Image (tube, rainbow, N blue to C red):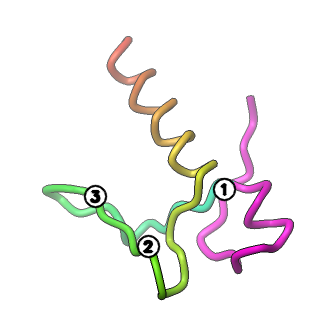
Amino acid sequence: MSLNFVDEARPNTFEFETSALIKASGFREYDARWWFGQVAPELNLIGVQALGMGLGTLIRR
């Protein structure tokens, strides 16, 4: 499964709904956090699913 990853995408656009939005600045050395709500999104549903698949693969290995 090949995903298209982007750093920025406007909500309610084709790119936002079909690409994995994961802003790299959301990763910290001690946790991970992204903005939700009133500001521009830094993570979308496909991005969360991609992070889950990556974490699952890491744990399995």
Q: Residue 12: within the magenta?
A: yes
Dot in front, 2 or 1: 2
Residue 10, image x, y percentages:
70, 80
The numbered mark, 3 or 1, whose residue comes first in the sequence reads: 1
Crowd band around label 1 with a 10 angstrom C-alpha radius: few (<14), some (14–19), many (20+): some
Residue 30, image x, y percentages:
13, 56
Residue type for callout 1: Phe
Check the picture and name the quadrant holding the C terminus.
top left
Nearest the viewer among 12 and 20 is 12
The numbered mark, 2 or 1, whose residue comes first in the sequence reads: 1
What residue does disc 3 label?
32
Residue 57, image x, y percentages:
45, 21
Residue type for callout 3: Ala
What residue does disc 2 label?
36
Q: Residue 26: within the magenta?
A: no
Check the picture and name the quadrant holding the N terminus.
top right
Which residue sits at x=57%, y=51%? 47
Q: Which residues make up the magenta segment?
A: 1-19
Residue type for callout 2: Phe
Which residue sits at x=58%, y=59%? 44
Crowd band around label 2 with a 10 angstrom C-alpha radius: few (<14), some (14–19), many (20+): few
Which dot marks residue 5? 1
Relative side of 1 to 35, left or right = right
Dot in front, 3 or 1: 3
